[in-house]
Amino acid sequence: MEVKETLNFIEEIIEEDLKKGTHGGRVHTRFPPEPNGYLHIGHAKSICLNFGLAQKYGGKTNLRFDDTNPVTEETEYVESIRNDVRWLGFQWDAEYYASDYFHQLYEWALVLIDKGLAYVDDSTSEEIAALKGTPTSAGKDSPFRSRSIEENRRLFVEMKEGKYPDGSRVLRAKIDMAHPNMIMRDPILYRIKNAAHHRTGNKWCIYPMYDFAHGQSDSIEKITHSICTLEFIPHRALYDWCIDNLEIFPSRQYEFARLNLTYTIMSKRKLLELVNGGHVKGWDDPRMPTISGLRRRGFTPESIREFAKRVGVAKRENIIEVQLLEYCIREDLNKKAHRVMAVMDPVKLVITNYPEGKSEHLTIENNPEDTESGTREVPFSRELYIEREDFMENPPKKYFRLFPGGMVRLKGAYIIVCDSVIKDDSGNIAEIHCSLIENSRSGNDQSGLTVKGTIHWVSAPHAEKAELRLYDRLFTDINPTGHDDKDFKEFINPDSLKVISAFIEPSLKQAKAGISYQFIRKAYFCVDSDSTPENMVFNQTVTLKDAWNPSKG
RNA sequence: UGGUCUAUGGUGUAAUGGUAACACUACUGAUUUUGGUUCAGUCAUUUAAGGUUCGAGUCCUUAUAGACCAACCA
């Protein structure tokens, strides 16, 4: 059956433009990050949207750094952003910086002054705010609003020449102090900042505001569809005002709802707070919703792109369940990740009828989902480790694992039956004694027995040790920033990171950083960049789904 | 004493005036040498009230709810 393709509202706009022949059928988008922090999964949605649209309609996408505020922006962030976009699988057509346009923007400010549409205001920040009015009451004109064009021009040029200190003067658009849209109440266009810029150094001491830079940058690059998030809706009036009065290429702005994720924060400022406050170990901490964090956690570009596709694009505020993200990474890794065995909470199991000192190599498939993935050799011997939770002395109904008198298959090996349990002085289980069934070896089973459960194991004398970093959600609240009376940091999950030592099968000894594995029956893990052959470190990406619910028996 | 945007299952996205669909979650059951995967099934009178129409989730009106707007941030 054919599934009818439906368009999101931006695709509808584009197809309408294509039909009308707007811009000669050209589609040109841009991804415009400010280099003041690392990209997060919300940006990934925007990246996939902007680049995806261009791909779909045979257009282009620029990467443009919106770097109009020198005090918060750094080259480190530029590098990380370029890296993350590339890693996600996208290549931009051109790389630009709003700072490339500083001179043009300055010229355009002069145009507005000459048209009587902009003026220099000597008021303080507080005075300007006071005259701004409120959403429900009109503002009042600044006492400097009626300066002559000549005076405005002279003052603005002097601002540029560095004759005035920070905060002493601004350039404002002359629009309407009673406008119902507060953005239009004589917005500030330029401010004085005697600060070094990461690209232009000390060349400038006046810097354009977002509203005087973004639309014009789009226009310079002949962007046809400038896509941003909902909070910029009121800015669209000013975006259009600048383009109209400057009589430049008519880029158009369209707004979609940003991504929100349950149990997650999605604000660069707040993520910075987590980094600076030492609540996480950096922007790429695997608990962070940053692209670099997700990458280190073991997420693949494919899984994130699939996620972006599945969350859709609309204008309605939304909060996506993290389970969808988890579904996407499991779906991808299920196809790709080799299966290996690791015991996270070990208890010793002795096979009493297996000769001491003997060992053999069993051939085990790497991935039953991928016949191309081949097999590997796994050593087997008399003493093994199994998970403590895979044995119960007094099991409930429907317990498929080991218990006294019970039978399970050791994955890829033999069927065993539990004969007895050895306890230490304090009553804890020290060893489980089993015997294996002759002729039950995996792939060559002539025992005729069928067992309900299969458990994983690692041969004790061959086992390697590894550090496992287990992650839980970073916040305990479904919407940490959704409480007016509480700071989001109050909801930080104290147990978001647990470090354990595990036994892993020896084939993992060569595992390289960034490679993902499925630790069978447990979770997907990926080799961390901290990992060395002497101290192997794995990050838990996501657990396997677990349908076993002991309480239901 | 304002303006703008948005309202469809638990979550998200469709249905473009004509049988409310798909995915995720959750819960059943089947299959399984991973309690994974896979496969089947269950879960909605579309915020409310009016109106237009043969026919409304869709158009109109009013209400209600939520979001955004008073940074020399973007």
Image: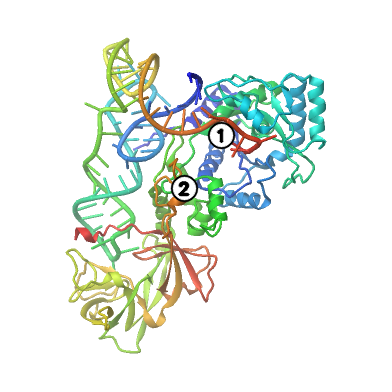
**Image coordinates for residue A163, horizontal then vertical, percent:** 82, 36
Q: Disc 1 to disc 2, how far (Cα)?
A: 29 Å
Q: Mark 1 or mark 2, which is nearer to you? A: 2
Q: Give the side of residue A274 with respect to residue B6, left or right.
A: right
Name the chain under label 1: A
The residue positioned 53% from the left and 69% from the top of the image is A531
The extreme bottom residue here reads: A356
Labels 1, 2: one chain? yes
Q: Are marks 1 and 2 in contact (CB under 8 Å)?
A: no
Residue kind at label 2, given as amino acid type: Phe
Q: Is residue A253 above or below residue A475?
A: above
Q: Which residue is mark 2?
A: A488
**Chain label for disc 2:** A
Q: Where does residue A395 sit, x and y in percent of width and height?
A: 19, 69
Instruction: Sort mark 1 into few (<14), some (14-19) or many (20+) by Cα contacts within 10 Å.
Output: many
Q: How far across and how far down the image is residue B29, in percent? A: 19, 53
The residue beneath circle 1 is A227
Foreground pick, A524 / A140: A140
